[in-house]
Image (cartoon, rainbow, N blue to C red):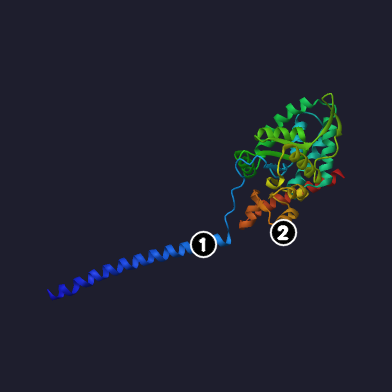
Amino acid sequence: MAALGWLTPRRRSATARSVLAGEAAAEAARKSSLEAESAVAETEPEEPDFPVVGDERAAAFFDLDNTVMQGAALFHFGRGLYKRKFFERRELTRFAWQQAWFRLAGVEDPEHMQDARDSALSIVKGHRVSELMSIGEEIYDEYMADRIWPGTRALAQAHLDAGQRVWLVTAAPVETATIIARRLGLTGALGTVAESVDGVYTGRLVGEPLHGPAKAEAVRALAAAEGLDLARCAAYSDSHNDIPMLSLVGHPYAINPDTKLRKHARARDWRLRDYRTGRKAAKVGIPAAAGVGALAGGTAAAVALHRRRR
């Protein structure tokens, strides 16, 4: 009995100590968790919700080529016109080279863009605007619909869901941009305007292509007409050529940025988003020997094609 009397208090004491240890551990864990949350709050303060729901004086402006859509809308449009016998294979070769350069370099080359615009203007000259609009709807389904970046599309939808207006701003023809905006459920589009008389294209532009500073002026004019506060608006682009437009708004975003825009955005603490698979793979160190080989082969083919043209 003496032995049992000696054991019983010890068992009770051990149980009490276990309870005490468990409670102490739980309190320490809770305390450390609260300290960690406090530290995160101090170093990474919560940002206000954006876009702001119901802010009618805010809007969003999206560049098109390589921001909303992979590649250049004008080149895809050219492919569709070639399929419909609007021009010969020689012109298709030019469009193919320009598109290859755009996809490989990831930047807008002014010479190539001007060449593409001149080609497109000569091709549509004499055709009715209504005819090209109808064809443009078909071309969107054939060549553009599957090239919309889902990530950028989601950003645009966030603004729409917040009750804000969303506009495309692009150097592409305004007719093409309008079709894309309508298909995506956006408010509308600002684009390059080709001259027409009695509904027939003349082969000339009204003013100049909506590119670079011209985009900023278009956004400024639209904001004034619509009663928008640019400080509450957002703009999205992949190109350093659109820095004037991005600098106008209070919420600039660099989307799939080229090297110059990435550097500019980081220096000014602008937000960046990159939806390109290749860039993501490079960031996490995924081996891409096959992809590099294909890219090198494509580059060589494009360069050879360009040399033959010369």
Lateral position of residue 274 relative to residue 223, left or right? left
Label 1 packing within 10 angstroms: few (<14), some (14-19), many (20+): few
Q: Secondary structure at mark 1?
A: helix
Give the amino acid at mark 1: Ser
Instruction: Give coordinates of residue 197: x percent, y percent.
Output: 85, 26
Nearer to us in this view, 143 or 63: 63
Lateral position of residue 128 relative to residue 150, left or right? right
Lateral position of residue 205 relative to residue 249, left or right? right
Nearer to us in this view, 82 or 39: 39
Inspect this view and state whether residue 75 appears.
no
Lateral position of residue 298 relative to residue 288, left or right? right
Give the amino acid at mark 2: Ala
Q: Secondary structure at mark 2?
A: helix
Q: Residue at x 75, y 35 (%)?
A: 77
Instruction: Give coordinates of residue 211: x percent, y percent.
Output: 80, 43
Q: CA distance from mark 2 to mark 1?
A: 28 Å
Q: Which mark is residue 38?
A: 1
Q: Earlier in the sequence, mark 2 or mark 1?
A: 1
Nearer to us in this view, 231 or 148: 231
Q: Residue at x 60, y 39 (%)?
A: 161
Instruction: Give coordinates of residue 99: x percent, y percent.
Output: 76, 42
